Image (cartoon, grey):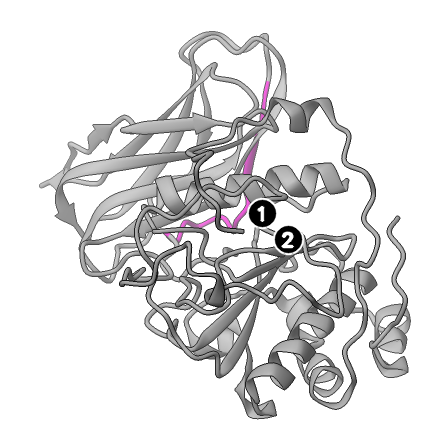
Amino acid sequence: MMKTTASLIPAFILSLMTSAALATTGGDNPVVFQKAYPISAEVSASEKVGAVVLDTGFSQASPFAVDSVLVQGEMPEEGLELQLLVEDKFLFFDTSDKFSPAKVKIFPNGRFWARFSLPEATRSPLRLKAINKGVKASHTLIIYEVEAMGSSRTGDGPDVTGTVSPREQAIYMPRELPFRLVRRAEWNAAPPKEAYESHNPARITFHHTAGRKPATVAAAYAEVQFIQDYHMNGKKWNDIGYHFLIDPFGTIFEGRPVGVIGAHVLYKNPNNIGVSILGNYHPPVSDQPEFVSMNSLITVGSWLAQTYSIPSPEFFGHRDLGASSCPGDLLYAYKESLRDAIFLAPIAKAAEELPTITSPALDQLQNWGHNTDFDGR
């Protein structure tokens, strides 16, 4: 476990964490099924080929025209086939159209994303199935999110590009900081696809990733790499959407440069800094918020507030700004206490020492899209 030299979380937060019984998805356009996310199924290696191992049933109709659908979760092997059905009833007959994903990407850590492209936009109910095509080992299939995408609505974006080169050092965090920051180069971030659009930070929004809560720091590095790839190649954004990500051990990762517009709250990204904690802090998963994670959130928030003169009323949870359960009920319960700590306390030296990262799984991670000539941080 890493050491911190200071703790900014007031006693009343500690009391809340230890004595109170604290009573989704991270995106703004989830496909709404009867079952709550995450949707999971036990997959047996003895299951016959062709068997349906997961069936969501049909979703609610979409409020907007959908032309592509994104799925992300955990699928450790390629022995499953995902199918997307679009409801198309004629009189009393169900003639649903069936589609295979245009792309599926499975990562060494078992995380995956898949993208379905529809030939024409639709508002019809959707249904996701997983078919056994020769599973080699029993495992749990987990669907963290099925997200609807439309030409006029692109997830938590729409993401924007501009004229600011990623080589422009002024958009990044200063080299000298009062806390430990894992820079983009350290977690092997891919460069953006295009130039960024600059902004002046004036608001802080905190999130949860609504996905896997890493069990080790090495797993957190892998999860951050997955999130960037999912954002860039699944959602087709310019870069990872968040400006900062924090793991359960308090590690602070540099995401998109702080001086440019991110992609984390639908239509409310300009001048808005997105900070996301890895994990799912909403029922039914209900991961428990970690003390060190919230301490790091306070650390980053305090630095941002002081550096950019951000006032206390400009601190939000994602759900305050959009139709989302993010950052989850359990994390959102600390919002006011976090606000008080961020805007009243000095900056802590959070995550000053990080464990040495040695992991065979991490070593297998490919440098997706990394350009060795890129000299940005």
Q: Residue 58 location in percent, x, y? A: 33, 43
Q: Residue 51 location in percent, x, y? A: 44, 15
Stretch in magenta: 31-43
Q: What residue type is labelled 2?
A: Leu
- How far, Cα to Cα, is label 2 from label 1? 7 Å
Circles 2 and 1: CB distance less than 8 Å? Answer: yes
Residue wearing tag 2: 278
At 60% from the left and 64% from the top, the residue drawn is: 328
Q: Does the magenta stretch include residue 77?
A: no
Number of on-image labels = 2
Residue wearing tag 1: 211
Left or right: 326, with 152 as reference point: right
Determine the image quadrant of residue 89: top left
Determine the image quadrant of residue 271: bottom left
The secondary structure making up most of the magenta span is: loop
Left or right: 267, with 298 as reference point: left
At 71% from the left and 22% from the top, the residue drawn is: 360
Q: Can residue 69 be seen in this view?
A: yes
- N-term mark: 2 or 1: 1
